[in-house]
Image (cartoon, coloured by chain):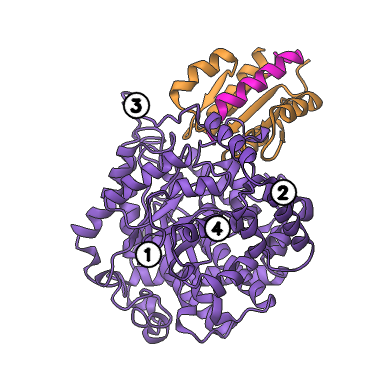
Chain colours: A orange, B purple
Amino acid sequence: MNERKIRILVAKPGLDGHDRGAKVVARALRDAGMEVIYTGLRQTPEQIVNAALQEDVDAIGLSILSGAHMHLFPRIIGLLQEKKMDDVLLFAGGIIPDRDTSKLKELGISGIFPPGSSLQEIVEFVKTHVRAA
Amino acid sequence: MKPTSENQFTTISGHPIKELYTREDLSGLDSERDLGRPGEFPFTRGVYQDMYRGRLWTMRQFAGFGTAEDTNQRFKYLLKEGQTGLSVAFDYPTLFGYDSDNPLSQGEVGRCGVAIDSLADMEALFDGIRLDQVTTSMTTNAPASMIWGMYLVTAEKQGAAWKDLSGTIQNDILKEYIAQKTYIYPPRQAMRIVTDIISFATRHVPRWNTISVSGYHIREAGSTAVQELAFTLRDGIEYVEYCLRAGLQVDDFAPRLSFFFDIHNDFFEEIAKLRAARRIWARVMRDRFRAINPRSLLCRIHSQTAGVSLTARQPYNNVVRVALQALAAVLAGTQSLHTNSLDETLGLPTQDAVRLALRTQQIIAHESGVPNTVDPLGGSYFVETLTNEMENACVDYFNRIDAMGGMIEAIELGFPQREIQEASYQFSRALERKEKSIVGVNEFEAEDEKPVEILKIDERVAERQCAKLEHLRSTRDGARVRDHLSALKRAAQDSANLMPFVLECVRSYATLGEMCDTLRSVFGEYQEPAIY
């Protein structure tokens, strides 16, 4: 049943162009044997959710460093619920202060990886949680 | 750095370092030809004869958040605390030429910088600050002509003459495609805007630095020190070539080109990088472009300590990193310096954190004794060898990019983007394998970290900004705005210099979004290939 590779969308919501982290993570996930689709920069919540639907992904990794996460993440989560895609694993990285972390986890972002997180940790997280779902 | 494999020591960029450097390493060095005296060709030892004995570097902290009124308060605070120049950070909507009430601006207004929608905001930003009495640096690229236009008109309204204005606009669009990614239009159209600005400034605002050719963002995106040096200076060459093609004379505009580098952790590598930059640029300007004016040969440098080197874990360690990086910048002969605040990997800096960062520079300037003599590391076997090696590696990159047809062509091929990406991934892997260390992150971790205070941006900024826009649109002369926007459009379709048309739009209180949309309708928008 689980022969198919894990499919992941790495997405950059918001206007910031800091794509170093997103690209390094995308490549690490690919090197770990997953199929990775990277959206490119400045994707609206609608574009991200549509891409996730079309690509039939198991997980979405969101990267944002502009500080707009408390506006954009809830919209992405809302759209996923609308499309009955609640089973898609959500994780996020970037500049996300501690004070926002618990709120985002409550909303449904399962993993939050601040600057300095190890790539191995992210890969393991995805493997464990996608398989568990 | 520790050995990456048996007996191998390398810089943070992976450049091999020997156990000992001696006179033998400098056998090919001709000190007259390769070093000269400070203020003399090839300027390896500094662009001015007396350097900091004559005047200290400019302490210039990048600042901006919330509304123009909020940032105006921060500017006045920084000036009161002894800062000697201003530097404006704009929010993302402003960098992309979207008004604050554009749906794409949602959640971003005033967050990473100050929100500027029109001349009215620029007037508020500098309220009570005489623009002929300060120098201002503005980090704006794709909409640089409009933001600078707003600054010029604000000065005009204060009664200041343009010839007395001094400052810098970043206006370096090439590194946007390579690294920072706040582009709007496609590269070739964007280059026209850049040359229009340079040409206009050369005639009307002669003390303005028309461009700050930037390696900072290239390095932050993950390049090595050599890649930063090479891509930045090759971008500089591209601008000179485009200006010459636009009919300008090299010695008329070259003296106002300036540069901006990142100062990362590897102390000597960074010092060698700035020394090499000055020598390479002087040689390029003399030999490749036949510049005669000595000021055309100067690589004047603004430096900023490396944001990417700051850690979210054990953030107080960042104070030490910044101090070392700032010391490297000063030993390397920078003309101005921004020191990062300890909390900048968590959010925009608090006022206390900014003051500590500024004090770090002041301690180097007034207590360490380092500024007493010029280029104190000149002649060091190690530093001179590293400087030579960086120059050679940089020239190799120039040759490869020249062979592609130039920097625009290289960007279109994705060459610098891929080089940076590869370096960035390799560095991340080296961290994972603990071949490179980050104290407090992959070594010397602590369990009991105390959180630091993080600046919170007022959530009502966007509301206030949108209300200001609504008021502006209902009180300005709408017909006049439309006329000037149409004139801008016709000028864009033609080949006229766009600056005078932009200035007229600004004076009529056209918004930034309206002006940028006008040019979008003619030039189109750039979409980058997503390479990873």
Q: Which residues are magenta?
A: A65-88
**Which is nearer the N-term, disc 1 or disc 4?**
4
User: Closest to the observer: B303 or B37?
Assistant: B303
Cα distance between the residues tagged 1 and 2: 48 Å
User: Amino acid under label 4?
Assistant: Trp
Q: Any magenta on residue A87?
A: yes
Q: Quadrant of the N terminus of chain A?
A: top right
Task: Find disc 3 in the rendering and name its residue.
Answer: B451
User: Amino acid under label 3?
Assistant: Pro
Chain for disc number 3: B
Residue at disc 1, secondary structure: loop
> Same chain for marks 1 and 4?
yes
The relative height of residue B411 versus residue B465 in the rendered view (above or below) is below
User: Closest to the observer: B134 or A103?
Assistant: B134
Task: Find disc 2 in the rendering and name its residue.
Answer: B479
Decide if residue B108 is in sight here: no
Task: Say if mark 1 contacts mark 4, CB within 8 Å.
Answer: no
> Same chain for marks 1 and 2?
yes
Cα distance between the residues tagged 2 and 3: 54 Å
User: Amino acid under label 1?
Assistant: Thr
Cα distance between the residues tagged 4 and 2: 24 Å
**Which mark's residue is nearer the viewer, 2 or 3?**
2
Task: Say if mark 2 contacts mark 3, CB within 8 Å.
Answer: no
> Same chain for marks 3 and 4?
yes
The relative height of residue B347 versus residue B129 in the rendered view (above or below) is above
**Which is nearer the N-term, disc 3 or disc 4?**
4
Task: Say if mark 4 contacts mark 2, CB within 8 Å.
Answer: no
- Residue B148 has which mark? 4
